Image: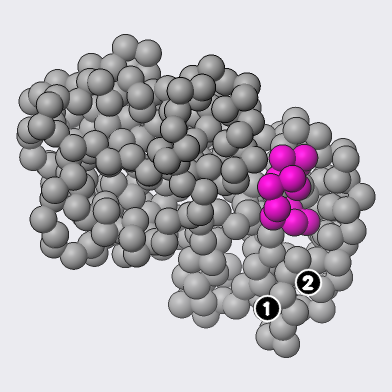
Amino acid sequence: MYKMSSEIYSCLIISPDFFGYSEEIKTALARRGINAMLVDDRPAADTLTKALIRISPRILRGKAEAYFEAVTERARSHPITDVLVIKGQALSCEAIRRLRLALPDARFTLYFWDSYKNMSSDSPTKVGLFDRAFTFDPVDAQNDVRLKYRPLFCLDEYFRLPPTKTDIDLFFFGTIHSDRYQVLSRMQSSVPNGMTFKKIMYFSSRLVYMGRRILQPAFWTAKRAEFIFKPVFKDELKMLLARSRIVVDIERPIQTGLTMRTLEAVGARKKIITTNAFATKTDFYRPENVLVIDRENIRIPREFLESEFCELPQEVIEKYTLNGWLDEVLPLRALA
């Protein structure tokens, strides 16, 4: 549930608590003189609620409606001029309409940092209820003309990592979903002898891990010690990234959008090995920096592993900063 406060807000952000990125957006807005009220896009953040919202949102419909009704009532008492919804997984079309009625002068902006295929079936309907809508997925933007393609961002701190000895050749950090574990296992056997491949594989709970152990043969021989069940502190992650030469990125098979990890690698001036073929169509693509692999038949040329990073133009780097993202997704409104 949201936190009560006596502050005056001009912006409402409804977003999942995704590794602290929504807080970073709020902080960046504060630097622009915008005080934002931040609330979760789900009525609760426990594992069961997350699972039910994804699998059968109707079960939690009453709880979600009551939650967003309370959010609406709270927002109504503030001079809100902007509403930014990021994903809005549990936010129904009816709740959006009620929010618009309560805040008739606000500009409503929607940002999907997930693909249509990985979200609720009413996600396309929600787009029509917003003044502006963006997606991180280029295929969704191509197929739905109402959506504008806008990649995610990299936090400023990744552009300023301290000079550190690079003693990790390949580095992966991420949640274990879809076929990530299988791809990482295949990749391990493709890494030449003498090169280090550090993997931090995260499960949001032991319950999810046990479900995989029981239902998916790929996990039957997996060792529990291979995985972690608590998020890594950001400072630790940054130091591991600074020590790494190459970042490994494995997107969901149903997704084409660039992951946050990819853009962190761009910001940190690290080479990238990715399963996402769309990376070759980006403005940061250089064959010296980005290698696209087949998730089923992994081949990693030694010359890519041994070559140095090719520097990128500053204008390309700026595009992927949080400020660059805000300039496009939530630009300052002209004074009436």
Instruction: Say which of 176 and 210 sits in front.
Output: 210
Instruction: Say which of 33 and 215 sits in front.
Output: 215
| Three-letter amino acid code of the residue under disc 2 | Ala
The spot of residue 262 in percent (x, y) is: 35, 42
Highlighted magenta segment, given as a residue range: 42-53
Within the image, what quadrant is residue 41 found in?
Answer: bottom right
Q: Earlier in the sequence, mark 2 or mark 1?
A: 1
Q: Which mark is residue 240?
A: none
| Three-letter amino acid code of the residue under disc 1 | Tyr
Q: From the viewer's perspective, is 224 left or right of 114?
A: left
Instruction: Indicate the secondary structure of the residue bearing disc 1.
Output: loop
Instruction: Say which of 318 and 13 sits in front.
Output: 13
Q: Please say whether residue 170 is one of the residues in the magenta stretch.
A: no
Q: Height in image: 48 above or below 68? A: above
Q: Residue at x 46, y 77 (%)?
A: 31
Q: Is residue 63 visible?
A: yes
Instruction: Indicate the secondary structure of the residue bearing disc 2.
Output: helix
Q: From the viewer's perspective, is 304 left or right of 92?
A: left
Residue at label 1?
9
Location of the N terminus by quadrant is bottom right
Q: Is residue 132 visible?
A: no
Q: Residue at x 86, y 70 (%)?
A: 73
Tag 2–tag 1 contact (CB < 8 Å): yes
Q: Residue at x 27, y 41 (%)?
A: 198
Residue at label 2?
75
Q: From the viewer's perspective, is 311 left or right of 319?
A: left
Q: Height in image: 160 above or below 300? A: below
The spot of residue 14 in percent (x, y) is: 68, 59
